Amino acid sequence: MALLPILSYPDPRLHTVAKPVTLVDDRIRALAADMLETMYDAKGVGLAATQVNVHERMLVLDVSEERNQPQVLINPELVWASDDRVKNEEGCLSVPGIFDGVERPSRVKVQALNEHGESVTIEADGLLSICIQHEMDHLMGKVFVEYLSVLKRMRIKSKLHKAQRELER
Ligand code: NI
């Protein structure tokens, strides 16, 4: 197991569209284990492969209080989304220190493969629903700040640039 470096917005690689996983094998299981370790270490609830610069459709998450219910979703596909929408405060390990409201469908149904290559269907609401949608956006090259106004996004970019420069000093 290993901690993986997480790409930070506005790194252009975060806008890469991920390709489907063709085979759920030991390589994918090792990647899933590393992604989970990285997510727990960074105290996140979800992490998409895109964020660790692997451009394959795969994400990990754990929305449990106890942090003991890891889930791996491979090739996730949205099969249904509710008409009712909710606005939630979102954050992202690739956009450190930034939290803002994003409106999304409140419930979704997603089909995916688990780390054993078995088909799973997940009906999600609450935090799980938000988290799955947020991570699936990453796989399409979309970061949550892109839902915000241009002005807000400019402020976030300059704030993150400043933080980056101070880190490099
Ligand atoms: Ni994120």
Image (cartoon, rainbow, N blue to C red):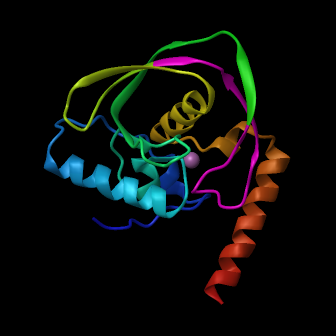
Provide residue 102's location: percent of width, then percent of height: 73, 34
23 vs 26, nearest the viewer: 26
| Region rendered in magenta | 89-109
Q: Which quadrant: the N terminus?
A: bottom left
Q: Residue 17, relative to residue 119: is it above or below?
A: below
From what the image shows, is residue 152 above or below residue 86? below
- In terms of image quadrants, where is residue 10? bottom right
Q: Is residue 108 above or below residue 126?
A: above
- Which residue occupies the foreground of this view, 73 or 43? 43
Left or right: residue 71 versus residue 13 is left
- The image shows residue 34 at horizontal and vertical percentages of 32, 58
Q: Quadrant of residue 166?
A: bottom right
Which residue is located at x 40 percent, y 23 percent?
77
Q: Quadrant of residue 11?
A: bottom right
91, 145: nearer the viewer: 91
Q: Which residue reaches farthest right?
A: 151
Q: Position of residue 24 (x, y in %)?
A: 18, 38
Q: Is residue 120 left or right of residue 62?
A: left
**Residue 103 on the magenta segment:** yes
| Residue shown at the point (71%, 36%) measured from the top left | 147
